[in-house]
Every structure is written in C-alpha cells, then in structure tokens.
Amino acid sequence: MENVIPFPYAVAPVQPVGHFIRLGESGYNKLANLHAAGRFPATRVVVDASRLKHQKELVSALRAKGAEVVLDTKVAELSALEKFEGYARHAPWAGLGHGGPLTPAHFDPKRAEDIFGQIARFAIEYKVHAVLAPGHFLADPTFGGWFDIDRASCLALRRALDREGGREIAIDYQLIVPHTALNDDAARSDFLGGLQDLPYDNLWVRASGFGNDAGPLTTKRFITAMAGLHNLGKPIIADYLGGLVGHAALAFGAISGLSHGIGEKERFDAHSWHKPAKKADNSNFGRATRIFMAGLDRSATIPELELMADARGGRRIVTCCDRACCPHGLKDTIADPRQHAAYQSFTMMAELAAVPDLNREQHFLSGRMADVDRQARQAKELKFDVTEAAGRKIDVAQLTKRLVDHSKQVEKMRLSLEDLHESRADGGARVRSLAARATDQRAGKAGLK
Ligand SMILES: [Zn+2]
C-alpha cells in the first residue's frame, strides 16, 4: 500500500481571507475617529452610494492606506416598497422613481435617464475600485423577472464604465436571495447557469433569513449550498454575515470572505421588503446600546452585561480580556462598544487568516468553536442577584432562558460542524480565494482629493 501524504507541501499554503467592512449609514464619525486612532485597520470597505458624499474623508484616508473600496448602489433597497424611503433615498439615482420605488423599466439600458451611466460616472468621480452590480431581491412577490434584469444590468454597467472612462473599475455580482433558495438544487442550477459569462470578479451572496444568529442546521446547509456554487470558479463573499456562523463558513472553505458592519449588518432579511414601510416609531432613538461579548458570540445591553459581571464567575465570561483592546476591562468596553467590536472583529479574522487554508476547519473547531461552547455552558449556570436585576429592570428568568437556549444552540452547532468535518475526510471542496485588486497603494496613485 502506498503511503498517504496528507500535505504535499513543504509549507501549507495560506490563502487570503476577504474581510469587507460595510461603513453603513450611521456612526461613521466614530469609525473615522477609530481610523485616526489607528484602530480601524480595514483593508476592504463597502460604501453606500447614499452616504459616500459624507464619508469622503474616511474613504480617502482608507484608500491612502491601500484599502479597497467597493460601491453599493443601493438599487436593491431603492426598488423595495419598504426600503426606498429609508436611508437609501440619498443615493443620487433615487429620484428616478419620482417618489416611488425604482421599477424594472428603470433598468432598461436604452432608457434616456441611463441609470448605468449615472452609476458609472459616480463610481469614477469617487474613484472606487469596484461596484456591486445593481441587484434585486429575487424572491420579490410583486415581480418575478429581476434575475434577467440584473444579469442585463451587469452587462450594461460594464459597458457604461468602459464608455465613461472607468475601464479599470471592477464589477462584483450581488445575488440577493432567500437562504432556502440556495439549498434548492433547481434554483441553484438556475443561478449557476445565469451567472456564467457575466463580466464580474467576485460573487456576493446576501442570503435573506440568514445571519450570525443562524442555527446549526441552517448553517450546515449554507456551507453545503455555497459549495454548490463553487463550480462558477468565482470567489464568494457572504454579505451581511458575521459572528461564529460567518467564521464557520470561512473555516470550512465555503466562502472566500465576509462583509458586515461593525457590530451591525451581520444578518439579512428581505421578507417584508414588498410591504409598505412601518410608520416611524422612533425605536431607533430609544434603542439600547448593545455590547459584543466575544466569548459568547452574542451581544447584551449594558445593564445585562453589568448584572452578568456581578454574578459569581460571570466577570471573566463577559469581560474583554484583551489588554490591547480594552486595557481596563469592562469599563473600557462599555465606554466604547464600537471600538471593542471593531477590534474583536479584525483580530478574529486575522487569526483565522493566518492559518493555512487546509487546516482551518480543525483550527476553528478546536479553537473558537470549542471556546464559545465552553463559555456558553458556563454562562448558563450564572446565578443572578434578583434585587440587583430588579434595579436594572432585567427579567432574570428571561435572561437565564436566553443563556440556556444559546448554550444548547452552540453545542448543537459544534456537534453538527464536527460531524460535517468528519464526513469530509478529504477536507471538502474549497472555494476559490479572493484576488487582490490594484488599490492605490499597490498602484502608487494618490487618493481622493
Ligand atoms: Zn475589548
């Protein structure tokens, strides 16, 4: 019998991991401050067309450091009844809808308003490196033809970029679908067929109903579904995905990268996009600050965090033990939750990225996955001071139930992923890794003025 040599390399290859940060709509001053303090080492960012004008300085500073800038046109939101009057309305082409959402007719390349020309000129003006091709939620119950329109839009955008002088600007394709459609063989082969021969670099998948809170079965299915898209031969970015679930998908070679905000946009849901927007209920104003507990892969409000810290054995579970992140522990975390969330996010990704591709599954399972499982088990045993809880307006029974449920879910996740790992003794199919684009630093050009 021949000897089996598991690693035919002198040194196992380390494939890059794509980490895109969505700058989002709000709080970008905080991100700018973090960047100025050297605490926002983003190498890839997604900027919204609705916000870019106001984020110019931050984007320019990131570009100067060699970061790659990707433009989101916000066309998906602008075409959705529930979303078109939200933040997306500030995108330069929002007005094409004349007070309503964008319709299929707006994406006719022959239309005089030429949305593709507008997007191309905007991308060139702001010197982005890539544009997410205008894409729509494909399960829109009011219109079933978006996929054909989106594919034609991808081609139209390429022509517009070339014509307007943006030949070097790349296009990434954005597939926005219910996560269940990705598990469906027939739907997936439609995607595979439809996405061939289009002029794009990376495939972005925004899976509706999926995210950092996904359960074990859904996560496993997502990993398998992504492997079903590998035949396209394109790197795959999971958009609006973060947390342990995102790291699992990366570690299992299902995706080439993640895209999410700092402590936000880590899950996605478009199921109500076709309905009218709910009347503003000011809930954003009263929304409590949530703090990411890396050890548990969950967030909590400040009163919850403090109550947990005061419980016996609780402090070390909820406290950030990373001196470089929060030198004074909990006090620092509470004082600047975004700084903490950013630091944790970058650190965890860098840690995974440093591991050779073929070792990532095992590394993840025995590392972060096992750590979270252990800490979640400890957290569910915490006994809270009832008087203190009442003072903080916390329902102890409810908090304990959340911790117990979380621990169960994390344990199932670990078992389920260990099972998946063992069932693919060959390591399974690995996604194509992300190629570096020519950014300013690599090309030696000056940034935005
Ligand atoms: Zn911290």
Image (spheres, rainbow, N blue to C red):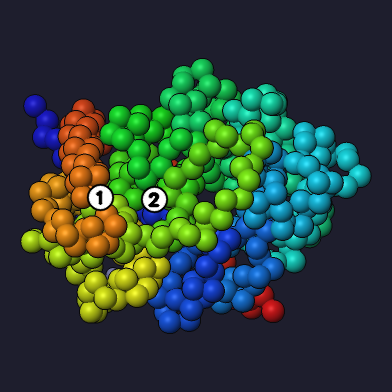
Residue type at mark 1? Asp
Which residue sits furthest top? 186
x%, y% of residue 428?
29, 33
Q: Is residue 159 left or right of residue 61?
A: right
**Which mark is on residue 242?**
2
Q: Is residue 363 above or below residue 233?
A: below
Q: How far apart are the two marked residues, 2 and 1, measured between alpha carbons? A: 28 Å
The answer to whether 303 appears left or right of 5 in the picture is right
List x then y, in percent, for residue 334.
Answer: 32, 71
| Residue name at image x 75 percent, y 66 percent | 125
- Disc nearest the viewer among 2 and 1: 1
Q: Nearer the viewer, residue 137 or 292?
A: 292
Residue carrying label 1 = 395
Crowding at dot 1, Cα within 10 Å, few <14 / some 14-19 / many 20+, comes out as few
Q: Are the two marked residues, 2 and 1, in contact with CB atoms closer than 8 angstroms?
A: no
Image position of 145 with respect to 282: above or below: above
Query: In the shown orientation, is residue 225 left or right of residue 275?
Result: left
For residue 196, the mark is none
Tag 2: Cα neighbours inside 10 Å, few (<14), some, or many (≥20)? Answer: many
Outermost residue toward the right? Answer: 112
Q: What kind of residue is marked 2?
A: Gly
Quadrant where the N terminus lies? top left
Q: Residue 81, how many percent across, how many down?
A: 69, 38
SS category of the residue bearing label 2: loop
What is the quadrant of the C terminus in the image?
bottom right
* Residue at 53% across, 43% down: 204
The quadrant of the rendered image in which ligand 1 is seen is: bottom left
